[in-house]
Image: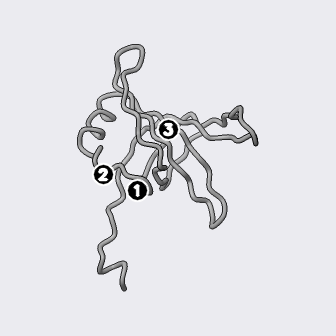
């Protein structure tokens, strides 16, 4: 299953690591806000040179609540072993871009 849309970074900081094969890997915990009281957690993984470039260019801007436009593939649900039971969506990132921050003038209008 594929997913394209706007998601929001959680309070959990992004994790930049190397995969077992040595490729750069970026893991983000994001939320898809489906409605006022309906939010889905997504754990998305992005690997490769584009992920490395995105991390190098924007790591200081990846703050909680920051909006991202993403294209995801291989979306699947994962049940967490906790009380109460929870689930999160897992997916691989095809592309990711920051949504420009709103200007203060637009926010006041």
Q: Are marks 1 and 2 in contact (CB under 8 Å)?
A: yes
Mark 2 burial class by Cα count in 10 Å: few <14, some 14-19, many 20+? few
Residue 87 place in picture, x, y as percent: 68, 40
Residue reaching furthest to the left:
57
Q: Which mark is residue 66?
A: 1
* Residue under label 2: 61
Could you say which quadrant of the image residue 23 lies in? top left
User: Tag 2 or tag 1, which sits nearer the N-term?
Assistant: 2
Q: In the shown orientation, is residue 85 left or right of residue 105?
A: right
Q: Where, by quadrant of the figure, is residue 35 drawn?
A: bottom right
Viewer-closest of 59 and 90: 59
Please identify the quarter of the rendering in which residue 50 is found: top left
Q: Residue at 56% x, 53% y: name it.
A: 32
- The label nearer to you, 2 versus 3, is 2
CA distance separating discs 1 and 2: 8 Å
| Residue 44, label in figure | 3
Which residue extends farthest front?
83
From the top left corner, tell me how far across and down residue 109 is, in percent: 36, 86
Residue 4 image position (x, y, % from top left): 50, 49
Q: Secondary structure at mark 1?
A: loop
Identify which residue is drawn at 52% across, 37% down. 73
Rendering coords of residue 71 (x, y %): 46, 45
User: Which residue is located at x 42 percent, y 14 percent?
Assistant: 20
Counting residues from the start of the chain, the first of labels 3 and 1 encountered is 3
Report whether 32 appears left or right of 100: right
Q: Is residue 43 left or right of residue 95?
A: right
């Amino acid at each position: 299953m594929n997913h394209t849309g706007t998601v929001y970074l959680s309070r959990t900081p992004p994790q930049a690591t190397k995969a077992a094969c040595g490729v750069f890997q970026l893991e983000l915990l994001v939320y898809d806000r489906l409605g006022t009281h309906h939010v889905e957690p997504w754990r998305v993984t992005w690997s490769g040179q584009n992920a490395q470039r995105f991390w190098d260019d924007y790591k200081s801007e990846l703050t909680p609540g920051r909006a991202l436009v993403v294209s995801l593939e291989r979306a699947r649900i994962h049940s967490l072993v906790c009380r109460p039971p929870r689930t999160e969506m897992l997916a691989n990132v095809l592309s990711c871009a920051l949504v420009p921050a709103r200007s203060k003038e637009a926010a006041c209008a």
